[in-house]
Image (cartoon, rainbow, N blue to C red):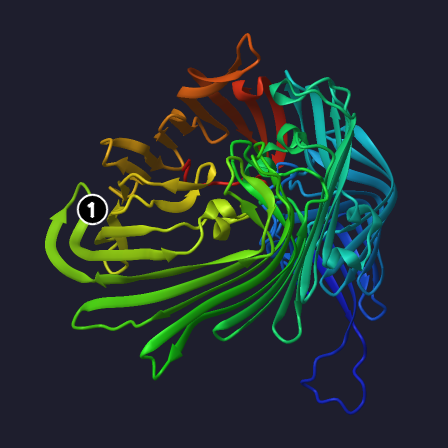
Amino acid sequence: MTVDADSVLLWFDKAESGLAKDSKLPLSEIYAEGNVTVRRKDDLQIADKIFENVKEEKGILINSKIKTTIQKREDKTSAVSAIKAPSQKRKTFTFEGLPTYIQGEEIRLIGKGKYEITNGKISTCGFGHPHYHFQGKKIRLTQRGVHNIVSSTNNAFYLEKYPIAYLPYLVLDVKKDERLLRDWQFGSSSRFGSFFKSDWNLFAVTGGNQKDWSDLILNLDYLQKRGFGTGLDFEYSRQDLFGYLDTYYIKDHGDSDINNVPIENEDRGTILWRHRQELPYDLRLEMEYSYLSDPQFLREYFRQEFKQEKDRETALYLRRIHDTSAETFVINEQFNGFDTTVDSLRERRYAERLPELSYQIIGEPIGDNLLVFSSESTATYFNGSFERVDPEVESESVARVDTANRVSMPFKPGFFNINPFMEGRVTGYTESIETSDAVDEANGPATGRFIGSFGFDWSSTHWRNYSFYNDFFKINRLRHIFVPELRYSYSPIMTKDPDEFYQYDEVDALDSSNVAVIGVKNKLQTKRGEPGLEKTVDFVDFSVDYYFFPSKAGLYNDGINGIIIREDNFINIDFRSQLTDIVAFVSERNEFNTEEFRFDVLSSGIEVYNLPDWQYFFGYRFIRDISSTIMLAGEYTISEKWKVTGEEKYDFKSLKLEEDANNNLNRENKTQNLRTNIILSRYFHDWIGSLTLELDPVRDDSSYRFDLTPKVMEKKPRRFWF
């Protein structure tokens, strides 16, 4: 403890007999007045007067303030984020390092680490007259270990001098993130009318040790045109397990959702539980339960989760990984009764596995590393599937056994890397599709097939250094890394056509293939930074791969609309360049069709980054027969207190479904603004007020909203990448 004041009086107990003359006398009492500051570990006490009986650990502080700092903690949500996508429903922030102030007319020390405050205030605002605070007539502060527990009754929450809320009981740990109101915003939308959304930390009110390992958030929302919405979000993290449970319910008073889809049931909502647990013997257990009231709910109310999250399902996944082998057990079922895939254009199937067993061996050396063996074997019972489009053949419950085994022989003659391989895949089905008649029929006999493949991978790595310098691009010598590659795979043996099987996943869709890929990877590196502190920077990263199909068998891959067949020869082009410290150019996943001599996919963007003053981004994305979109984004700091951000997306080839006189849907291309977003931010001493104007023609919605969040919650992304 350290005491500073204009005047300080110290009382010491009399020296006990037998003590040496140079021994320190025990401190008994302290009295100080005038600009008194007392420092105790992480806490700072400020008062006009202070008296403390050190021996009895009692005292009094007049016109005083206690400042304590929120401690850094183990983030229990960091583990949860591994299984949880970023949520539109609420934000995750931290107050770590932010001071908390507790002040009152009179603070009494009634025991070790125990204080009673008369007419007290609690705030994270450091001003002498705080802009916001809780106020109570009698507040108790208990310091125990890493905790500073504040409990109070009959509390009022003030903004400036105006009370806006009343809480009969309040418990806060002011050394931790104990905000009662986690987040709030209000505004107006053409789809929802005026709205108010808020997230409340229930554990901040109830107290308890469960706050150390969990969070419980109450969502309270009001949408003028749709009604009241509420939900509970529970996150937990213990030593060997973590997970979260999200719920939401709204009694929807609207008539239709986006795209004028009628609302059939006004009781709408969602339940999502995801859990991960480490078990003995290297086992990991993952579980998920999902409920959605209807297929349109997420698209209407939680579009970020709808676009970015994995498909929702009810599943149990058990795995064990040991050395080069892995065993898995999966059960997944769609209790919702419909597919919850995130993109309505995806022509994919959701297949229920009840269950699926698999065993994998990855890279097991054989014969003193002369050969490498890899294998994957699965046994699956499919309980039907959900379709995005009406299938020609109704899916049935089928059992499937599949095993794929590969033997490769990697070797390195000189500076070449060569890896030839042979693979055999055997698949058996309890039921097939009868294709002998003019019309395909279900309930065919049990069947199976064999696919035999072989191929090789070849590559070589070369590099050279150049003494080249350029001040404008800040080039301090160049290193050129050059990697030519050749990959070839051929499946000449296939005993059954994939049309004879129910299509549940990519294994059933496999067909004969003959693919050659010729590629070159180029990288130019330089050094940038202060002398002696230079770092290697990838100045240019340029890759070209030419996909060639000698027999026109095509290539199965994950395309925009799910698993598709690519039959045309094409060139894949990826280019990145960090031109200077503030200018970057990127153009990735471009596909040039060499047979039709035009781009099927083309994307590029340039960003100029000069924070804290400004940054802007210009991008273009082209997908043949689907879209041709430009993207603009910019951020400009007007002054220390004001900043403006804007985003724009415009599609010159947007698809639109038009219904003709015969009730047939026809696809038409038209130009369309996809989204306009402008944010004006005002910085206060520890808060940020933001006014957001948003135009979303795709959802037929225009809105504005106002947010007020602490500065420590501000996110500062470096890139706008689309």
Occupied quadrant, residue 483: bottom left
Percent from the top left, x then y, of residue 525? 22, 53
Question: Which residue shows up at 42% across the image and 56% down it?
Answer: 495
In the image as oriented, which residue stretches furthest toward the bottom?
18
Q: Is residue 351 left or right of residue 337?
A: left
- Of residues 650 and 315, which is closer to you in this image? 315
Q: Residues within 10 Å of mark 1 (few under 14, many from 20)?
A: some
Q: Is residue 328 visible?
A: yes
User: Residue 562 at x, y = what percent?
Assistant: 48, 40
Q: Residue furthest front?
A: 437
| Viewer-nearest residue: 565 or 3 | 565
Residue type of the residue flagged with mark 1: Lys
In the displayed structure, 244 sits above or below 401; it is above
Give percent across and percent down for residue 105: 81, 44
Q: Residue at x 55, y 63 (%)?
A: 378
Q: Secondary structure at mark 1?
A: loop
Quadrant location of the N terminus in the rendered image: bottom right
Asked if one can make out residue 39 in the rendered structure from this viewpoint, the answer is no
Residue furthest left in the image: 467
Q: In the rendered view, does 289 fall on the left or right side of 438?
A: right
Q: Position of residue 708 (x, y in %)?
A: 63, 31
Q: Quadrant of residue 258?
A: top right
Observer-nearest of 376 and 19: 376
Disc 1 designates what residue? Answer: 474
Instruction: Report the number of numbered marks.
Output: 1
Q: As rendered, which of 53 and 256 lies closer to the eye? A: 256
Position of the C terminus, as image quadrant, is top left
> Considering only vertical position in the picture, is 343 above or below 512?
above
